[in-house]
């Protein structure tokens, strides 16, 4: 079995297809590797491929007029991104490797042919794109919320996507500098430092050497993210 086929077997988008059906188009996917912080595509680039993460993590972001990034989504191994290319001629957001990463990608025309051939995949991608659109709208709505709420939401999102349980809570498995947190939430570094210090003093989170964050009190962080607890 080829590496491409093995990867595609674990992609939820293709869950309804048999191994034989996957094998009929698996070799059409192009393998690529990217170093950490490399942009795979930027907002406004032609949307000409469907992408699947093989290894590593990809973040989908939009930049503000001031150049700060707002995190829309974190894409993990086995998940697809760039699927909005079937709806738009250009990418509506930017994709950046959060870690060293490898991907498989399929040209737009081949992807559309695949959708015609397997209608169940078409229905699945409509659902996935709907989920991504709702997530993006929620993140945009957060831009007007209190800074505590925005940071709490981002930490929970990262914990859900790249977190692992520990004896104390949930550890976000990637180093995050105060600059990273500021950029992801559209706030200043000084504000990010102040809020993280507040979260630590309240026992909501703790930081570990290397920039790793452990969520200690998920209930309180969730209440902050939902705006049901004063910051």
Image: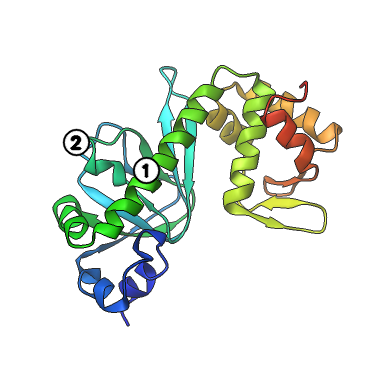
Circle 1 sits in a helix, a strand or a loop, which is it? helix
Tell which tag, 2 or 1, sits nearer the viewer: 1
Decide which of 23, 170 is in the foreground and name it: 23
Decide which of 211, 121 is in the foreground and name it: 121
Decide which of 101, 109 is in the foreground and name it: 109
Examine the rendered structure and indicate whether residue 203 appears above or below residue 208.
above
Colour mapping used in the image: rainbow
Q: Residues within 10 Å of mark 1 (few under 14, many from 20)?
A: some
Quarter holding the N terminus is: bottom left
> Which label belongs to residue 64?
none
Q: Mark 1 or mark 2, which is nearer the start of the sequence?
A: 2
Asked if labels 1 and 2 touch by Cβ distance under 8 angstroms, the answer is no
Examine the rendered structure and indicate whether residue 83 appears above or below residue 6.
above
Could you tell me which residue is drawn at 64 percent across and 39 percent down?
A: 155
Q: Can see residue 195?
A: yes
Figure quadrant of residue 182: top right
Q: Is residue 197 left or right of residue 156?
A: right
Could you tell me which residue is drawn at 80 percent across and 45 percent down?
A: 216
Residue 159 x %, y %: 64, 47
Residue 140 x %, y %: 48, 25
Circle 2 sits in a helix, a strand or a loop, which is it? loop
Figure quadrant of residue 184: top right
Q: Can see residue 39?
A: no
Could you tell me which residue is drawn at 67 percent across and 29 percent down?
A: 226
Could you tell me which residue is drawn at 67 percent across and 31 percent down?
A: 225
Outermost residue toward the bottom in this view: 1
Q: Is residue 90 left or right of residue 36?
A: left
Figure quadrant of residue 223: top right
Decide which of 168, 124 is in the foreground and name it: 124
Residue pointed to by mark 1: 129
Residue pointed to by mark 2: 89
Residue 224 x %, y %: 72, 29
């Amino acid at each position: 079995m080829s590496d491409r086929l093995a990867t595609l077997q674990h992609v939820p988008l293709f869950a309804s297809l048999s191994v034989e059906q996957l094998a009929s188009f698996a070799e059409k996917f192009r393998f690529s590797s990217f170093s950490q912080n490399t942009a795979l595509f930027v907002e406004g680039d032609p949307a000409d491929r469907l992408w699947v993460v093989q290894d590593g993590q990809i973040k989908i972001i939009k930049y503000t007029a001031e150049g700060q990034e707002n995190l829309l989504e974190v894409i993990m191994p086995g998940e697809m991104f760039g699927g909005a290319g079937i709806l738009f001629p250009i990418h509506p957001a930017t994709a950046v490797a959060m870690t060293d990463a490898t991907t498989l990608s399929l040209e737009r025309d081949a992807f559309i042919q695949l959708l015609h051939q397997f209608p169940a995949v078409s229905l699945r991608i409509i659902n996935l794109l709907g989920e991504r659109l709702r997530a993006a709208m929620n993140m945009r709505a957060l831009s007007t919320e209190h800074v505590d709420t925005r940071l709490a939401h981002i930490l929970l999102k990262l914990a859900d996507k790249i977190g692992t349980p520990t004896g104390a809570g949930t550890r976000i498995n990637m180093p995050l500098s105060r600059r990273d947190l500021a950029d992801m939430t559209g706030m200043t570094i000084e504000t990010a430092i102040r809020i993280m210090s507040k979260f630590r003093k309240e026992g909501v989170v703790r930081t570990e050497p290397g920039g790793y964050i452990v969520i200690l009190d998920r209930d309180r962080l969730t209440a902050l993210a939902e705006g049901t607890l004063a910051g």
